[in-house]
Image (tube, coloured by chain):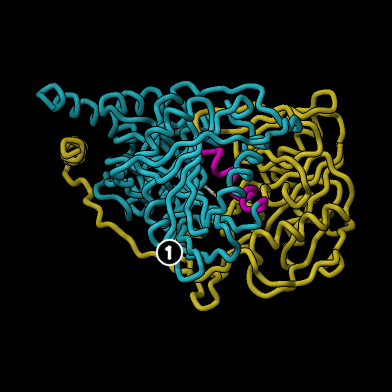
Chain colours: A yellow, B cyan
Amino acid sequence: MNILVCLKQILDPEVPARDFRVDAARREAEQGSANLVTNIFCENALETALQLRERAGGATITVLSYGRPTAEDSLRKALAMKADAAALVLDEGEGTPDPLNVARVLAAAIKRLGAFDLVMTGREAGDWGAGQTGGLLAEELGLPCVSFVDGIEVEGGRLRLRRQTDTGWELFEATPPVVVTVTNDEHNVPRIPKVRDVMMSYRQPLTKLTPADLGLAADGNDYYEVAELSIPQKETRCDFAGGDTLDEKVEAFARHVVEVTRGM
Amino acid sequence: MNDVLIILFAANGFDKGAQGLAGAGRRLAGESGGSLRAVVLGEGAETLAQEVARVADAVVVADQAELSEYQPETYLNALAQVCRESKPRAVLLGNDTYSQELTPRLAHRLGGSAAGDGVEVRVDGDALRVGRQVYGGKAHAVLELKKSPAVVWLRARSFAPAAPRETSGDVTRAALDIQADTRTRVVERRREAGGESRLEEARVIVSGGRGIGGPEGFETELRPLAELLGAQLAASRAACDAGWVPPTWQVGQTGKKVTPELYLAVAITGASQHMAGISEAKTIAAINTDPDAPIFKHSRFGIVEDYRKVVPLLREKLKRVLGAGF
Ligand SMILES: Cc1cc2nc3c(=O)[nH]c(=O)nc-3n(C[C@H](O)[C@H](O)[C@H](O)COP(=O)(O)OP(=O)(O)OC[C@H]3O[C@@H](n4cnc5c(N)ncnc54)[C@H](O)[C@@H]3O)c2cc1C
């Protein structure tokens, strides 16, 4: 079984709101002192692939990223987590490519890299959160797609996919090749690679390509453009329950609760 | 060409989400100078269509056997056909699982542009603009969709419902040529226990975070409190990822977007991604040991204490008030 996992490097989404700034003119977030990290849902996807390989007793996992040169670190980390091969398509354009641009580049790279039974992406990324890459990629590749997957089993050449819905789960049977987008679940929390493996990963081969190598012109964004980017200011003044004893404090808190629920 | 088409699933009925979607669609149709159309899919579509017709100018029922229940590839094919025929300027969907899944793919099939999680949508000259949270709720962006049609899923419950029209819109049945696509197939549906009551419709929510410390805290402390308040239980991602509570309980950017009168956050930090799911809550209140927890910056009232001490006492006090004709 050949598995391809798409990884996106993003600004650390855990940066607290008070340290977060945007450049309104460029309509981009400022990196400031924040780290660049692999998008968590992409790591959930990789973790799902790694576990699938363990259970299926073998599979080849290729990781692919379209990004700045720094995205190499995300791919190296994935190799340290024991992905088998890695490829980076260097984004040399200005600004952030829109979701359709990203999907076109990934699709072209995937066709170049080989034939895959399973193409995986995160459900969305922690920066722009568009949630479109998996779906658009499926369309570019002419493949079916199942979203919000949190578990995959192989069963005699077919795949059994479990995906989360608003009210529970749906189980799918799928005939490869198929694209899935992965969401978080208690079972796909990404493993943490050993420091030694991370260091060693920098000696492993890594394929580097440009969109031009894939026959794609840098067209700019023709799907959507970010017209405005701002930080909303909204803080509420909190009325902290006061009092000398726990009982007094809880009493004050309870009064608030009653007031709100009575007014409903 | 200036029409707005909304997509509804029969299984969800004419709930607050469907009503909000119709409201958003009606306003957008007004701005673009077109009519409001709807397509209703799935078994029982006819019944929902009659309700929707009261607020829409035209409703298409798509309930043939192949569409009786959701299958992504089949629904996508059907919707692409409906859209190609009616050629709308914009296609709007709600924020349920299926809508989120279909939106980008439908846009691609129609040669359009998609956006998701919209909290505003408007026509601006030739352009269609969508406002949404980005960076885990830390920033707000306005996207200008360049291709037509625009296909957008909205936080439908945040939009005011549409007013009924004097005359109901026409209801017609679609005759679609649907090819069976067996590459993927839903073979089983499992409802989460309690999944029949919907968090999105709850008026009071008691929500727990990592600080609850384990599944027991949810059962022995939060559940009785929720029962007392007639509230539903919810959780942060940290509590769901730990496996303490099911993923359907997750509230936030990648969980449910809720709109209660009261959201009581217990042992939840208030990370921006969590807040992204409760920005429409009327009142937020918090119980947290850390006075600097960001959740207090969004709370109308709060208490800095260990929840294990607060909740039992709170239950006692509420019970007393409730007993006295609450
Ligand atoms: C792309 C992306 C999407 C995400 N989507 C979501 C989402 O949809 N929903 C979501 O919730 N998160 C989401 N997150 C995760 C989010 O960033 C936070 O990590 C998460 O919300 C933290 O959960 P928490 O507040 O329960 O845990 P913690 O941050 O660990 O906070 C625990 C809190 O409990 C308090 N506490 C501890 N013990 C007690 C006690 N005994 N009594 C009272 N208080 C106590 C602590 O002071 C602390 O404030 C997302 C993250 C990313 C990167």
Task: Give percent across and percent down for residue B161.
Answer: 33, 45
Read off the residue under disc 1: A18
Q: Residue at x 46, y 46 (%)?
A: B37
Q: Which residue is drawn at 86% across and 50% down?
A: A85
Q: Quarter holding the C terminus of chain B?
A: top left
Q: Judge by depth and name the residue closer to the eye, A251 or A167.
A: A167
Can see residue B291?
Answer: yes
Nearer to me, B211 or A178: A178
Q: Is mark 1 on a helix, strand or loop?
A: helix
**Label 1 Cα neighbours within 10 Å, binned few <14 / some 14-19 / many ≥20:** few
As shown in the figure, which amino acid type bears the numbered disc 1? Arg
Residue farthest to the bottom, as pictured: A25
Identity of the residue drawn at 10% across and 24% down: B325
Is residue B219 within the magenta segment? no
Q: What stretch of residues is rendered in magenta?
A: B96-109
Where in the figure is residue A125, as x and y percent of width and height? 60, 53
Q: Is the magenta stretch mostly helix, strand or loop?
A: helix
Number of numbered discs: 1
Q: In which quarter of the image is residue A232?
A: bottom left
Residue A150 x, y percent position in the rendering: 64, 34
Above or below, comparing residue A260 to residue A22 in the picture: above
**Residue A21: image location, x then y, percent:** 48, 70
Specify whether B34 is left or right of B67. left
Q: In this view, does A79 lie to the left or right of B280?
A: right
Image side of residue A11 versus residue A70, left or right: left
B89 or B138: nearer the viewer: B89
